Image: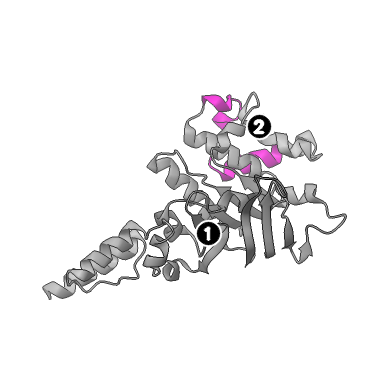
């Protein structure tokens, strides 16, 4: 669906402040994938995210969306922004209308959708993100943090994007709110077939939800693999300021103490199962 080919991004070119943000980036993401992007602060994650729908333009290289170069002359980047929706950290800060329904309608109306159709699509999106009708005519600023975030995501989903790119979307939420957002993304991916690209600092979240992980370091892609393969690279991750999920750390410690557990377990459920199996075998 989308492919980055030899992408470089340099800020303040030919000035004393020239900075290389991204260097020789190459990867592709297929339709229906759930891909996570991780990396230490300053690794280039946010710069990469801005390239997906043309919010930022690469200094060199090509980005192909459905095999078409988005940088070719005459390409409609305006329409691309409808196909690839971006949700930034603290998206609730982008809410501004008088009520929830109007806020979710705003983007649709801006793209020329009629008022009637905009309301229909907005209600569908709000239902999808689990926002009850009783909130439709409330000010978005009266909602809880988690609800505000779901409304903001609903505003992007109302545009029916093929790809949803989310930059640290669970930041600042409590455990319950965070779980609701992540389960929503999983549902959109598995039931609605939406391609999800999630930037996260949580190793637990990417282990639990993603199918593939891109690991960034100093503006380059260090690793591109499945979660299980990524989290086998403990020394490599630690060298760039990252770690393995807590569940994986625990099973590795237990292994060192003689318990026959599966050290490839990376989620809480996998760790629980292998520990119970190992304890059962030990008692037997």
SS state under label 2: helix
Residue 114 sits inside the magenta stretch: no
- x 73%, y 48%: residue: 81
- The mark tally for this picture is 2
143 lies left or right of 64:
left
Q: Where does the magenta region start and end?
A: 119-142
N-term mark: 1 or 2: 2
121 lies left or right of 253:
right
- Residue 159, image quadrant: top right
194 lies left or right of 83:
left
Give the image location of residue 53, x and y in percent.
70, 51
Q: What residue would you read off at disc 2?
A: 103
- Residue 205, image quadrant: bottom left
Residue 159 seen anywhere in this rendered image of the structure: yes
Q: Main secondary structure of the magenta part?
A: helix
Front-lying residue, 116 or 197: 197
Residue 2 seen anywhere in this rendered image of the structure: no
Q: What residue would you read off at disc 1?
A: 216
- x 76%, y 67%: residue: 67
101 lies left or right of 206:
right
- x 44%, y 71%: residue: 229
Give the image location of residue 105, x and y in percent.
70, 35
Give the image location of residue 93, x and y in percent.
58, 32
Quadrant in which the C terminus appears: bottom left
Residue that sits furthest to the right in the current view? 74
- x 36%, y 64%: residue: 266
Quadrant in which the N terminus appears: bottom right
SS state under label 1: strand
Q: What separation in Å lies between label 1 and label 2 (alpha carbons)?
A: 34 Å
């Amino acid at each position: 669906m989308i492919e980055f080919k030899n992408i470089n991004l340099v800020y303040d070119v030919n000035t004393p402040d020239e900075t290389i943000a991204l260097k020789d980036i190459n990867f592709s993401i297929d339709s229906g994938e759930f891909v996570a992007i991780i990396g230490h602060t300053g690794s280039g994650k946010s710069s990469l995210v801005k390239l997906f729908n043309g919010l930022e333009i690469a200094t060199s290289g090509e980005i192909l969306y459905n095999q078409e170069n988005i940088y070719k002359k005459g390409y409609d980047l305006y329409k691309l922004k409808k196909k690839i929706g971006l949700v930034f950290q603290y998206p609730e800060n982008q809410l501004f209308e008088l009520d929830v329904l109007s806020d979710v309608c705003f983007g649709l109306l801006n793209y020329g959708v009629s008022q009637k159709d905009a309301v229909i699509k907005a209600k569908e999106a709000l239902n999808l993100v689990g926002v009850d009708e009783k909130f439709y005519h409330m000010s978005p600023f009266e909602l809880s943090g988690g609800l505000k975030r779901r409304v903001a995501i609903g505003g992007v989903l109302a545009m029916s994007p093929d790809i949803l790119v989310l930059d640290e979307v669970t930041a600042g939420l409590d455990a319950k709110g965070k779980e609701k957002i992540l389960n929503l993304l999983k549902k959109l991916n598995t039931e609605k077939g939406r391609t999800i690209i999630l930037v996260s600092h949580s190793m637990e979240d990417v282990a639990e939800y993603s199918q593939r992980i891109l690991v960034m370091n100093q503006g380059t892609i260090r690793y591109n693999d499945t979660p299980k393969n990524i989290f086998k690279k403990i020394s490599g991750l630690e060298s760039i300021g990252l770690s393995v999920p807590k569940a994986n750390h625990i099973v590795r410690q237990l292994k060192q103490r003689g318990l026959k557990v599966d050290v490839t377990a990376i989620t809480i459920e996998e760790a629980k199962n292998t520990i119970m199996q190992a304890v059962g075998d030990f008692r037997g």
